[in-house]
Image (cartoon, helix red, strand yellow):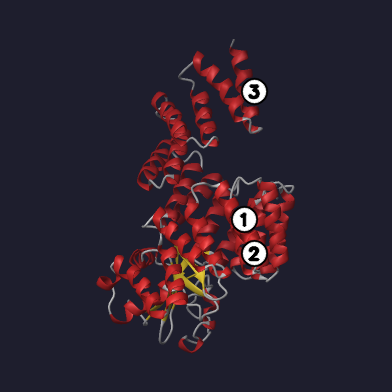
Amino acid sequence: MYNDRIEDFDKAMKLSREKQFRKAEILLLGLLKDNEKDKYVLFQLGKIRLKLKDKEGAKKYFEKCIEYFPSNTYPMLELGKIHVKEGNTKKAEEEFLKCIELDKDKTPHARMEYGKLLSMIGRYDEAEDQFLESIKIDKDRTPHARMELAKLYAKECKFKKAEVELLKSIEIDKDRTPHARMEYGILLRKMGRYKEAERELWKSIEIDKYKNPHPRLELAKVYYKQGRLVDQEKQLLKYIEIDKDRTPHARQELAKIYRKQGRFEDAEYQIKKCLEIDKNNKQYVFLELGRLKIEQGKLDEAEAAFNKCIKISELDSIQARLELGRLDCIRRGDKAGIKTYQYLMDNVGYNAYYEGNRYKIIQKCLINDLNKQIHGVINKDCVNVLNQAIKNKGTKQKGRKIDLYCIYVPECGYEGGAKGDGHTLDYLTLITLPDSSKIMGMFPSDGINLEKSRIFRINDFTDTKEKNKGDDGIEK
């Protein structure tokens, strides 16, 4: 009987590895009937429910597992991850801290997951401590904690430190998995080293035997930066072929390419396919349809699409309202456009918070300035974005006339301007008077490597002597 039970459990695990989750679940439920307190079966049923995208079902199994075995940290860790996905960071933190306490640093997993959470919510110093502890416990048997530490350093624009950690990850991993190479490729792209990025991403693809679509998406971003649009399109189409339309990411990028190339029917087809793949993505679809209709000169249809976008969620409709302002400028003149923008300003209380120059600065951040080739546009409540930036701190470049900050604020804006492609921007660049909180300018960006930031308003910066510089060439 016992041997039969082990055999059935092994069969279920094999089916799960083969992604036959329903069949695996049936076998495990049979085993649970014989012993409802089997922690291994309960845990695996929770994992299968997660694979089937049933978070509530997964939670029930993990909670049962903890109820019968309160010292079992594995289901606690999984519960913490679910809370992170649901945006419940306080509950996630509680679960991870319980795991760390019970585990007594026998394994590195709890500290690594806690570090990822701290990084996500902007507590970077604490996150770094957790990743370093995880590395110490793991004794470099696996590269995972080093990769997460590298991502954290990249967020803070500490690119040299990030590169050191990723090269160490590659050394530890010995190309058994594609992840370290892919992360290194992403980092090299951010650093503007496109040829090296391309090389690392192709290595990642080869290691994975061409099965994983994600490096293809990253490779497409490299080709976009190099202006190789044909190669970019090929990689996005390959992503779709491998992914089998489980996610809409590549089709979203293709729609932008086709819109820029004037292939409007192809762009509309890709946008509608995105909705088929992800029915919760209606806001994106109507926003992109509106932009497409403007390019086609179908202004009534564009206005209808933007209004549908706003109707879905008034709170998350800033981009649609900005596009309506642009549309009103085209159709009814600048005064009508300004009135539409003013609605946005007044309804989030910017007048009450900003005065004088600050108010003008925020106006510039909110309006998609088509007189500029590329323009970072804030797509959230500017007050919240600024407060988050101040909380996150980030890296600083001191100068004679201004100080320049580059701060990680996820999804704070998008790339606008005449040639902007609308992609999400995850950094806020902030310009202040020296050693002052008086803001002279701010805009969302892809992140500026502050070692090379003298390109920006070069006359305002101190000379290029290397004295008093830290790891990334930034004065401390």
The picture places residue 386, in percent across and down from the top left corner, at 36, 68
Kindly indicate whether the residue at mark 1 contacts the one at mark 3 (C-beta within 8 angstroms): no
For disc 3, the neighbor class at 10 Å (few under 14, some 14 to 19, many from 20) is: some
- Of mark 3 and mark 2, the one earlier in the sequence is 3
Kindly indicate whether the residue at mark 2 contacts the one at mark 1 (C-beta within 8 angstroms): yes
Residue type at the position of mark 2: Tyr
Residue type at the position of mark 1: Gln
Q: Which residue is mark 2?
A: 258
- Of mark 1 and mark 2, the one earlier in the sequence is 2
Nearest the viewer among 316 and 202 is: 316
User: Can the viewer see residue 447 in this picture?
Assistant: no
Q: Disc 1 versus disc 2: distance between alpha carbons?
A: 9 Å
Compared across the picture, whether 93 is left or right of 41 comes to: left
Q: At 55% from the left edge and 22% from the top edge, which residue is drawn?
A: 28
Q: Which residue is mark 3?
A: 11
Quarter containing the C terminus: bottom left
Q: At 68% from the left edge and 71% from the top edge, which residue is drawn?
A: 227
Q: Disc 3 versus disc 1: distance between alpha carbons?
A: 41 Å
Q: Disc 3 versus disc 2: distance between alpha carbons?
A: 47 Å
Nearest the viewer among 255 and 162 is: 255
> Which label sits on residue 270?
1
